[in-house]
Image (spheres, coloured by chain):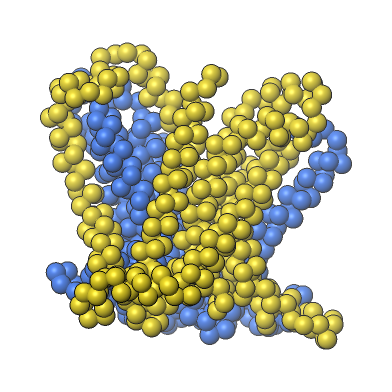
Chain colours: A blue, B yellow
Amino acid sequence: MLLHAKSARLATWTLLAAALLLLVAAPLLVTFMAAFAGSWNGVLPAAPTLRHVAGALAADNFSSLVVSLQTAVFASLLAVLLGTWAAVCSASAAASPGLARLADAVFHLPAAVPSVVVGLGLLTAFSKPPLLLNGTVAIVVVAQSMLVLAFAYSTVSAAARGQDPMVALAAASLGASQLRVLLTVRLPLLLPAIAAAAGLAVALCMGELGATVMVYPASWRTLPVTVFALVDRGALFDAAANTLVLLAVTVAVLAVIAKCRGNSAVR
Amino acid sequence: MRTAAGPRVTPALVGSAGVGSARVTGAPKAGPASSFPHIPGSWRSWLWLAVPLLFVAVFFAYPLAQIGAQSFQDKYGAGVGLANWQYELSSAAVQKATAATLKIAALSTLGALLLGTFIALALSFVPFRGAGLVTRLIETVVSFPSFLIPLAFSILYGRTGVVNSVLGQLAPGLPALNFVNDVPGVVLAEVAFYTPFVVRPLLAVFSQLPRELLDVAGSLGSGPLAIVRTVILPAGLPALAASAGLTFLLTMNEFGIILFTGAKNVMTLPMLIYTRSIVTFDMPSAAVIACIQVALSLGVYCLYRWTYKKLSGANHAAPR
């Protein structure tokens, strides 16, 4: 307790409430209200309608949602698999600090480069032989998973380095092979961190725009790109409805992952 | 990104227990002689690490190298030496974009630091019922798409937005509010989006600060502001410096927010890369600008890692 005067506390809380309202609540609230607004020329929206949300769930926009969901799931799976793999390797390599430092540097690096440049690089490198990926779905998945790999790696490696090495050593001393120690001791202990990494990866992929807008083929348009096209046309209410659907689906996926995480903690 | 105080304690404790594990014997002297017995193990670790490393090499390092190569070629792949570089480096558009990128990043970082420090201080030291819920809400917002904020801004404050139409009805003569499509709008949106990145690490540090310190300082006659200045902020300095570096890096690289505000006169380097490559198909030009951007970003990134290591190391060694 830092402030003992009641007036000072009240003043702080008022400021805090104002800041949070503007930062956190207002964008969500405005998007929500706009998604259901027929028109909005006064202080409050008028003529409530389900038209925009229905539009977001119909035809083209719905297929964008499915595309986003598929891309996010595959990209996250790839990123979490590789991130966990690298994190476990670099945590086991504590005897050679050089390896751990190299892994840290390499796997954090993609997050330091702008997403637009990651997209441009993929476009430049894979529009010509030996590997032609431009115009395929794979390039979108690869772009997104490259961007979230750093987050997956850092989440899992923080947990892996915090792990008590005695547990794995005890299992090994009882005669378990390295593979068995990995599969039955170390990875299960890392499951909460892996689930957290997966949740973060899915959320980031669902909203990814910078690299996707560089590499997406016309047949594989993710929802953020669709939202951008709507904003560009000035269809703000439709954009708000699509964003709302995107958020709802993201939260649903996160809830599923959190559920898995809860179950894994019980075991 | 996250404070390493928690996980970092465990290996140290295990190490001091001094059971003859491989890591304890290998850790203290890092000479080639002491690492000799572990060569088979470490070779195997290198081999295992090769798979994820290969992925990064093929889909990150190779593409970056291709951008580098493209910056010395014309549209058809013929080498042109330094011509692209000379042209772009002397072009007013690139110079202006570089300045705009740095300016917007600096302003956004400053705003996020001020606002984030205030929010973290208020949540930690002037607690109220529901503070935990607010904290969790802030953690959720980090994973929302960044374009949510500029979208809401456009609906509220855009040229045909809510505020303008209300103002138009109240006072028809007034000129329309038009800051969303300009630098202030972009900076405000970035401050709103990146403030949680400052709040989270600060909350983690503040929660580990012993409350007795504050009570002692208070009982010795320090006012709240003095306590913040002399006790709380020094403890939060490493986290603050780290999140300043991270926020500066991320705002420098920011693309979605600026694209969504539709600001034609806010041309940052990422926007310029997008425009040159996707809109006008000028790949050599985009490649040169991308190289400039990568050099800037990596410079800031190295500075951030260095600061973070230096500060957290100093903090770690300090007597508790």
Q: Which of B272 and A74 is in front in this view?
A: B272
Q: Which of B106 and B53 is in front in this view?
A: B106
Say which quarter of the image contains residue A99: top left
Left or right: residue A195 versus residue B56 is right
What is the x, y in percent for residue B311?
50, 34
Above or below, comparing residue A141 to residue B52 in the picture:
below
Total numbered labels placed on residues in the image: 0
Say which quarter of the image contains residue B211: top right
Above or below, comparing residue A234 to residue A169 in the picture:
below
Q: Identify the residue at horizontal 18%, vertical 32% (top origin).
A: B42
What is the x, y in percent for residue B210?
64, 25
Left or right: residue B241 versus residue A11 is left
Q: Which of A13 and A214 is in front in this view?
A: A214
What is the x, y in percent for residue B177?
73, 77
Q: In which quarter of the image is the C terminus of chain B?
A: top right
Q: Is residue B184 visible?
A: yes
Left or right: residue B301 versus residue B199 is left
Q: Identify the residue at horizontal 36%, vertical 30% (top origin).
A: A163
Q: Is residue A240 visible?
A: no
Left or right: residue A139 versus residue B219 is left
What is the x, y in percent for residue A53?
55, 77
Q: Identify the residue at horizontal 57%, vertical 62% (top origin).
A: B103
Q: Which of B303 and A194 is in front in this view?
A: B303
Q: Identify the residue at horizontal 39%, vertical 63% (top origin).
A: B292
